[in-house]
Image: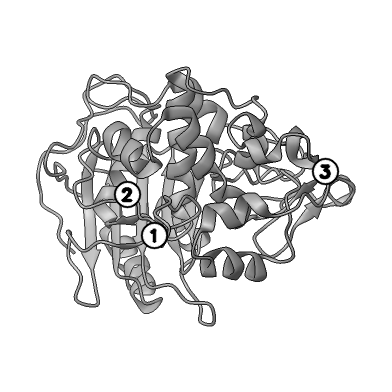
Amino acid sequence: MTASAAVASSGSAFAGPVGDDPYPGAEWERGDPVAAGFDPAKLARIAEELKADKSNCLAVVRHGRLVADWYWNGTGPESAQEVWSATKSVTSTLVGIAEAEHRLGIEDKASKYVPAWAGTPSAEVTVKDLLSNDSGRHWRSAFDDAVAVFAAQDRTAFAVSQPQDVAPGQFWAYNNTAIQTLDAVLQKATGDKPIDYARKKLLEPLGMRHSEMTRDQAGNTNTFMGLQSTCQDMARFGYLFLRNGHWDGTQPVPEQWVVDATGKPSQDISAAYGYLWWLNRLGPVATVQNPMTREESAQAPHTQLVPSAPQDMYWALGLGGQIVQVDPGSDTVVVRLGPASLNSPSASPAKTARIVTEALVRP
């Protein structure tokens, strides 16, 4: 662990844009984990468990200071890697920025930006439906869907060309292909490729110097995966949301977007999903491997993604246990990154939640 016995945090235990809590400059300001309220032995024990899960890095931020970070497998603070579907939460944020600039509205029909859908069953799909994973676009299974769009040379054209299975709002499924169509939506709405829009509007303003969205073989921006980033850069992204879209005297993302994207379910089928963010709200819970129809949702038990964690905790999650965890109640951000794996255990949000529920012993 690299954690300095620097200045103890004096900020509020609740998220918000005001107070004395710092924002990172070129580097994160470091804080002492004990002064920040953590039991170092419990924190180290959870870190060892995450190390055993083949993690590459783990970073813990409280009250705006980096209080603990670990790097394994030959990685370091500047080691960038694929964060897989945690990219989706970045894509969602770009939509929120574009809406704030009056480039689009999430209630807009997506066919306004994807002309090929005009006059087809997909004409009723809204941008909000794409963000909420209830668009009704073609989907067979999480695995088949991901493999098909990943294998396409022109991922955006492939995604746009898929048929409409059901009307929007009737079926929640983790639809990678549908989310890739947001590349077309964003480019048409903003006039920029999302890779460039992200750099100008999000990555550079936050100082995410080691982060970059990527392109497919046809030059399209990957929006369902593809972001290359580091633990500390992704902590900046999480901290932006913890601070309600504020960043050191600026407002890269509207406060209302943070509320809408993460503060409540974006649809009434799965309580565990906002605008391409995973939520811990109580209600019927659909997951990557378990889609849910509206009828199934009405009969499903009410639970949480992580029942032991606070209801207002939320996550950007990716294949292989890529995790950006934001907990407004404890004013913390936790990031864990590691290699992708389809056939071996990986870290889960239940484990990173323990950093708040077990290792954090003082408010």
The picture quadrant where one finds residue 122 is: top right
Question: In what quadrant of the picture does the C terminus appear?
Answer: top left
> Of helix, strand and loop, which one carries label 2?
helix
Q: Position of residue 95 (x, y in %)?
A: 48, 33
For residue 10, side relative to residue 197 (left or right): left
Q: Is residue 305 at all visible to an observer of this figure?
A: no
Q: Are the two marked residues, 2 and 1, in contact with CB atoms closer than 8 angstroms?
A: yes
Amino acid carrying mark 3 in the image: Gln
Residue at numbered disc 2: 234
Question: How many circles with numbers are drawn on the protein?
Answer: 3
Amino acid carrying mark 2 in the image: Met
Amino acid carrying mark 1 in the image: Val
Instruction: Work out how far the residue at label 2 is from the one at label 1, CA to CA, in angstroms.
Output: 9 Å
Whether residue 41 is situated above or below residue 358 in the rendered picture: below
Residue at numbered disc 1: 83
Q: Which mark is residue 170?
A: 3
* Residue drawn at x 82%, y 43% as measured from the top left: 170
Q: Position of residue 93 (x, y in %)?
A: 44, 36
Question: In what quadrant of the picture does the N terminus appear?
Answer: bottom left
Q: Residues within 10 Å of mark 1 (few under 14, many from 20)?
A: many
Say which of marks 2 and 1 sits in front.
1
* Residue drawn at x 64%, y 64% as measured from the top left: 145
> Of helix, strand and loop, which one carries label 3?
loop
